[in-house]
Amino acid sequence: MTSLAIPKLDQKKVRAAVEKELEAYRFCLLTLDESELPKMTQSFSLIPPSHTNAFYSKTEEAAVDNVDRRNEKRAHIDRVVKAVSKLTETERAIVVQRYLQEDETFDYIIYNEMGLSHRQYYRIKARAFYKLALALKLPLLYE
């Protein structure tokens, strides 16, 4: 039977990378229903229409860009939700309360509400970040 070697990661870099992903999640939620509409200004051209799939209109380009951005945001949200759902109940509670809820809260409030000691809380949080880094397929940041 072979033993799997667990890589030793730089906790500060992992924490920064995971926090960046979680912040992007919150940003995606805030901007998902964007109101960026293309300009509907009429324009005329003497160039005859072609029957290719090329876009010649700024409106068409803007619409395609909006759809692409919205799809990227939805994909990021889904990735984060799937990764967080793989955590244990306590780890998930910490990550959700600290990073995924609309109202910002602080670590000391969360560990007091959960009845955890300062040390327990940060150990669980570090383990959750390690798991999230692997689940989100972030580049592994070795020491």
Image (spheres, rainbow, N blue to C red):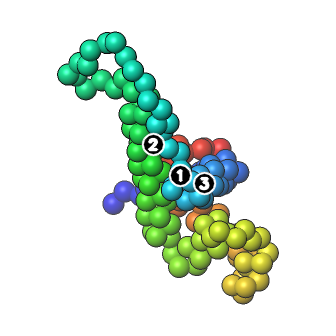
Q: Is mark 1 on a helix, strand or loop?
A: loop
Report the mark closest to the observer, 3 or 1: 1
As drawn, is 4 to the left or to the right of 54?
right
Q: Is residue 136 visible?
A: no
Residue 41 as seen in the image, left or right of residue 107: left
In percent of width and height, residue 4 lies at 43, 56
User: Residue under circle 1?
Assistant: 34
The residue singled out by tag 2 in the image is: 66
The type of residue carrying mark 1 is Glu
Which residue occupies the foreground of this view, 46 or 137?
46
Q: How crowded is mark 3: few (under 14 residues within 10 Å), some or many (20 or more)?
A: few
Residue 6 screen position, x and y as percent: 51, 55
Q: Quadrant of the N terminus?
A: bottom left
Residue at the farthest top position = 46
Q: Which of 4 and 126 is in front in this view?
A: 126
Q: CB of mark 2 within 8 Å of CB of mark 3?
A: no
Q: Residues within 10 Å of mark 1 (few under 14, many from 20)?
A: few
Sequence order check: which comes first, mark 2 or mark 1? Answer: 1
Q: Which amino acid does label 3 sit on?
A: Phe
Of labels 2 and 3, earlier in sequence is 3
Q: Distance between the residues labelled 2 and 1?
A: 9 Å
Circle 2/circle 1 CB separation < 8 Å: yes
Position in image of residue 121 (x %, y %): 70, 74
- Residue at 36% x, 23% y is 56
Residue 76 position, x and y percent, is 47, 53
Q: Which mark is residue 74?
A: none
- Answer with mark 3 or mark 1, whichever residue precedes in sequence: 3
The alpha-carbon separation of the residues under discs 2 and 3 comes to: 16 Å
- Residue density around tag 2, few if under 14, some if 14–19, many if 20 or more, within 10 Å: some
Secondary element type, mark 2: helix
**Residue carrying label 3:** 27
